[in-house]
Amino acid sequence: MSGSDKQKLSNGNKQSDILVGVALLLLAAVFLYVGFSQPKVSNDYTVTPSETQVYSPEFDSTALSNSSTAQASSSESYGAQEVTDIAVHFPINLNTCTRDELMAIDGIGETRADSILAYREQLGGYTSVEQLKEISGIGDTLYAKIAPYVTV
């Protein structure tokens, strides 16, 4: 083999190495994109309240004798409902879900959950998740945030 033949082989090997390196980098970029572009949805999401409040009106002599204590705590517990732990499996079905299940989604509070349920009754059931955008207070930003967690 002459010197020019060895140099041609050497240049060919360098070009092959560069092409393989570029291909590996592109492949790694594709894997990273696919891995990080998917929304994180857990099927075992448990809602646990930080504290449970129970409201039960007491109209006996014990409650009346402790009126000063009751007055101090009545502003905190008045109207509170019993809060229980519920397990929510996402995505939840808009046509069968409960208010508590809707409230487990970040961005949906009591008012929005009630609006979603009232609109479901008005429609007779959802036919598309995108119908949520028709509800006052649910724009494109909030819809994009909650859409991965609901289905019809």
Image (spheres, helix red, strand yellow):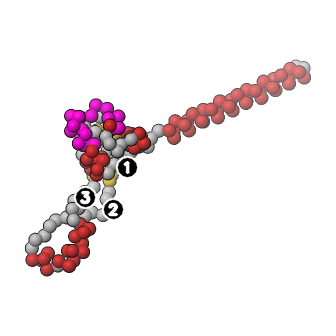
The disc label shown at residue 83, or none: 3
Q: What residue type is labelled 3?
A: Val
* Residue positioned 57% across, 33% down in the render: 30
Magenta highlight on residue 81: no
**The one of 112 and 1 positioned closer to us in this rendering:** 112
* Distance from Cα at disc 1 to Cα at disc 3: 17 Å
Q: Report if residue 91 is visible in the image.
A: no
**The one of 82 and 110 positioned closer to us in this rendering:** 110
**The one of 28 and 137 positioned closer to us in this rendering:** 137
Residue 29 in the figure: left or right of residue 22: left
- The secondary element bearing badge 3 is classed as loop
* Distance from Cα at disc 3 to Cα at disc 2: 10 Å
Residue 21 location in percent, x, y? Answer: 69, 32
Residue 145 in the figure: left or right of residue 14: left
Magenta extent = 116-133
If you read the primary sequence from the N terminus, does the residue marked by circle 1 or circle 3 appear first? 3
Q: Which is more foreground, mark 1 or mark 3?
A: 1
Assess disc 1: are there few (<14), some (14-19) or many (≥20) residues with their C-alpha within 10 Å of its C-alpha: few
If you read the primary sequence from the N terminus, does the residue marked by circle 3 or circle 2 appear first? 2
Residue annotated with mark 1 = 106
